[in-house]
Amino acid sequence: MSSNAHRRIKSVSYAKYGYYFILPFFLVYFFFQLWPLINTFLVSFHGNGKDVAQWIGLQNYKDILFGGEGRKVRVIHESFFRCLGNPFILWIGNFIPQLALSLSLAVWFTEAQLKIPGKGFFKVVMYLPNIITAASVAVLFLQLCGQSETNPGAINLLLYKLGIVKRDVIGAGLYSTVKFVEGKWQSRIVIMFIQTWMWFGNTMIMLMSGIQGINPSLFEAASIDGASSGQVFRKITLPLLTPIMAYTLITSMIGGLQMFDIPFLYNKDLNVRDHIKTVAVMIFQYFHAQSNENKMGYAGAASVLLFFVTLALGLIAFYMTRDKDEIAKKKMRKKAAKEARQENRQFGGIRL
């Protein structure tokens, strides 16, 4: 027996063990996520209330997208588009400052020339809000911003001490003119701030990993050529961070459109107001209505529509943030390979 044959007999493949390690994920996904996803599609084709078992086809989608006869249908139609617009406002309002802050901190922490004492400590502190549950954060800010006339909250009291808000005595309580919970834009700004505060640390870590993955020789060459820090940031750091920023944009957009816990809990008596209600909150309320008034069909249809809206926006964001230089190089490689094949066929038919 040859030595090569002997080596083939003795070799052991460990590739199968990789499948064993990822098997639990697929089992959990199949039992807890795949079937609920399929069932959501099925529920969207059924009726509501007492007719929940009746198959009605695309009627729920027609009512939500185009409205229909009856006041209830018009309310559902208007509510869906209002709840679809609110997450966009809340997401854009928190993503822009979040990205600006995270990118600034990521560049600052990865700057080799800056010797920052306690850099690791600051990284941990800035990431800590990300590991706090959203329910705890919502309740915390609800207490800080005040829930009633007798409980104006610490922020309102601080603003009163600074002379920014006025004090009006109503009964036995203190009433502040800044309605952080009930006001339309006041509550939106608070939720935007909460989202920014919770997620900027995670975004910062992602961008830091992207910056540290850039070849250091590029920065060294730019330094030798006399490039300023601004030029290095614009010409090297930003272009090479495009894949990480695209990932951050898409994941943030998906999370923003599916926002639920903060808007749902940042309310008095869980009475979610229209100006901060999201599609996820609307779906939750439809599913948990009384048995004779539930709107499970509408909730399923709204879930499916939200899925397709998120998918479409994700594809658009992915297309807009793709690496155009790499695509151009790939096209050039395909063109060169095609020309090489044509030359091979051309010269292959010639007999010497």
Image: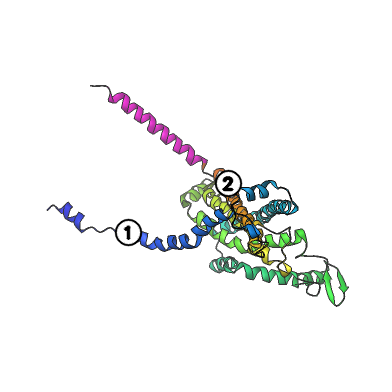
14 left or right of 260? left
* Rendered image: mark on residue 321: none
Looking at the rendering, the stretch of residues picked out in magenta corresponds to: 324-352
Secondary structure of the residue carrying numbered label 2: helix
Whole-Å distance between the Cαs marked 2 and 1?
Answer: 36 Å
* Image: 43 above or below 349: below
Label 2 sits on what residue type? Ala
Label 1 sits on what residue type? Lys
Q: Residue at x 53, y 59 (%)?
A: 36
- The answer to whether residue 25 is magenta is no
Q: Are marks 2 and 1 in contact (CB under 8 Å)?
A: no
Q: Residue at x 32, y 57 (%)?
A: 15
- The answer to whether residue 349 is magenta is yes
Judging by the rendered image, the residue that carries numbered circle 2 is 312
| Residue nearest the observer in this picture, 112 or 214 | 214
Q: Looking at the picture, how far across and down is residue 85, in whole percent?
A: 69, 52
Quarter assignment of residue 108: bottom right
| Residue nearest the observer in this picture, 28 or 60 | 60
> Would you call the spot at circle 1 few (<14 residues within 10 Å), some (14-19), or many (20 or more)?
few
Q: Earlier in the sequence, mark 2 or mark 1?
A: 1
Judging by the rendered image, the residue that carries numbered circle 1 is 16
| Residue nearest the observer in this picture, 254 or 65 | 65
